Image (cartoon, rainbow, N blue to C red):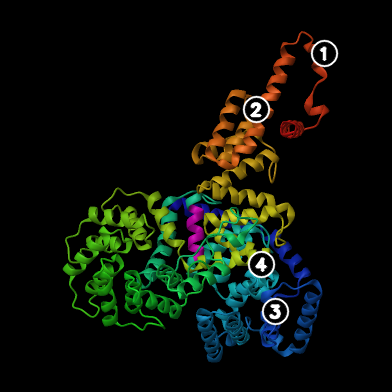
Amino acid sequence: MNPLALLVEILIIIEVTTKNTEAERYNKKQKEVNVTTQVSVSKVKQFLLYLLEQGNANKITNKRENPLEKKKHQHKLKIKGIQNKNLLKRNQNYFKNPAKKSITDEGDELFKMGNKILQESKSQKQKTEAYTLFTRAANMGNLKAMEKMADALLFGSFGMQNITAAIQLYESLAKEGSYKAQNALGFLSSYGIGMEYDQAKALIYYTFGSAGGSMMSQMILGYRYLSGINVLQNCEVALNHYKKVADYIADKLEKSEGIPVEKVRLTERPENLSSNSEILDWDIYQYYKFLAERGDVQIQVSLGQLHLIGRKGLDQDYSKALYYFLKAAKAGSANAMAFIGKMYFEGNAAAPQNNATAFKYFSMAASKGNAIGLHGLGLLYFHGKGVPVNYGEALKYFQKAAEKGWPNAQFQLGFMYYSGSGVWKDYKLAFKYFYLASQSGQPLAIYYLAEMYATGTGVLRSCRTAVELYKGVCELGHWAEKFLTAYFAYKDGDVDSSLIQYALLAEMGYEVAQSNSAFILESKKAKILGKEKMYPMALLLWNRAAIQGNAFARVKIGDYHYYGYGTKKDYETAATHYSIAADKHHSAQAMFNLAYMYEHGLGIAKDIHLARRLYDMAAQTSPDAHIPVFFALMKLETMHLLHDILFFNQFTMKWKWLKLDSTVGPYWDLLVIGLIVAMLIFLLRNRHR
């Protein structure tokens, strides 16, 4: 680690130490509000167990509790706490007595069973069964099961969001060295959710979490050092953190291609989220199934692909994928043949690993010139699966598939030249093929490009480029699955659960999550943050998203400074952000806003000609801007004409009393637009008569 960065971290830790008095006062206040940590944790565990065993979890999942039901559940919680005094006492002493810290074999077995069910679950009933096992394992002292429970309470699984209980459980787990708990406490401290807002304390939690092995903490620290968030900006430290996570992700990607997750932008379709193209609507899915059964080969292959990797909000289902691929293959689809070969090459529940079957289907697809089939044959010869290892044959097939633009084949060629597998090492050729594959989003190609930039292998070393590439790989981690659960929670009206998930992803550096979190915060529908914190926190998140290239976020920052949301009114700063959005991102909204400011001289020198030009540019940039630009120009020309008449009139002095802002009000321009619209309607009606 850089000595300067280390010194800064030490200074921050010292600063936190000096605040012990405040922290103790805050903790004392928290204890007065809530019952003691251990008792509350035990009650929560018993309450969850009670609900799950009674089979009420499905009801909680499908609808939010009304106030009456909530009170009943709270009453049940108290009753369960009283009825299980001995069990509560056992849990109170759990962390104090070292002899009881060891995980029992039964608890460990229950956790493994629950985890297996959760990974393979396709229905809420199975997930409920998994959490029943987690709850039982947690009551037997299984720390991993307790982590699962704490996450469920924090993120609102089964509608059971209880942040206070989650914090108490995390604090107990943190004392036992849980890096997941350290990361969660750091996240909550950084937003001030259920805890005191304290960035220094958050940094300490993240540091301990990363030291314990938390990939999320590593990623958060990488993003903080990259962007200079509460630490000195340091590319090399960011590179170190991101590389550790990227190595972890790349290792998993080499075993399987991974499942890309759709990142829905709430800002794009706030009125009709169900029509978002990132998620397949259920009715459309049923229609596609109907077409597939009627023999539409293209739809059969598409549905097979969606089920193979679990895209567009559909569950991963190998049986359905194989079903559709087989139907399409019988109809002669080369793509379907290649995907069947891929399924047997990798092996899964529906298509057990079989090299001979994979070779058969890859060959059938390759004979039709299919790039996926050619790539598959190359893999078989490269790894020696069912055939002898033959790098020459592998190179031939990879080259043919790469010429057809298949990114996985381009990556394999790059890897052969990078590692010298069957060919002479050639870093320039390796860079060429990695770059081609990365343009299609091939994750391993991006990873190896990052490696080359980080080490200066075959290319001029660039820390910034390497970090940006590593960051792209890190964002493919399993934690990205929260994008879907957060989206569905928002769509179902569970705003708090959605916000907490988006906020965690935002902390990890996901630009989409930053803008989504800000969007939810400014709607003021969330209850987990005080209203006075919402605009300042939203402004912070919009700013982080804007730095990562989000044009909409840049315009939002301008709006916040213009209206004084979460900050003081500052027309100059607003104009600066609008200018950046207009010049760099060609935002029509920014052009329109900037034109208005030039028209009225708000924060910048008044310039009617430049205002006209910006209005015209906004109309040319976006068709949606035509109507507002038309009315804005009509108002501008009318007021400009009125100004000229008054200016040249010899009795101008008599008109000094005419101060539109003071007589008509601050929104006099809207009144003028209304009058213009009324005049146009009047003229059009008379014309038709």
- Give the labeled residue for mark 4: 492
Q: Are marks 3 and 2 in contact (CB under 8 Å)?
A: no
Q: Residue at x 57, y 69 (%)?
A: 282
- The magenta stretch is 216-225
In the image, taking residue 553 as reference, residue 423 lies left or right, namely left
Q: Residues within 10 Å of mark 3 (few under 14, many from 20)?
A: few
N-term mark: 3 or 4: 3
**Cα distance, mark 3 to mark 4?**
14 Å
Q: Nearer the viewer, residue 282 or 89?
A: 282
In the image, taking residue 261 as reference, residue 491 lies left or right, namely right
**Cα distance, mark 2 to mark 4?**
43 Å
Q: Are marks 1 and 2 in contact (CB under 8 Å)?
A: no
Check the image and report above or below for 54 versus 184. below
N-term mark: 2 or 4: 4
Find residue 113 and name its label: none
On the rendered image, what quadrant is the C terminus found in?
top right
Check the image and report above or below for 105 versus 192. below
N-term mark: 3 or 2: 3
Q: Position of residue 496 (x, y in %)?
A: 67, 64
Q: Are marks 1 and 4 in contact (CB under 8 Å)?
A: no
The type of residue carrying mark 3 is Lys
The type of residue carrying mark 1 is Lys
- Give the labeled residue for mark 3: 59
Magenta-colored stretch includes residue 224: yes
**Cα distance, mark 1 to mark 2?**
25 Å
Q: Are marks 3 and 4 in contact (CB under 8 Å)?
A: no
Check the image and report above or below for 558 versus 34. above
Q: Residue at x 25, y 72 (%)?
A: 377
N-term mark: 1 or 3: 3
**Cα distance, mark 1 to mark 3?**
73 Å
Does residue 586 appear in the picture of this structure?
Answer: yes
The type of residue carrying mark 2 is Glu
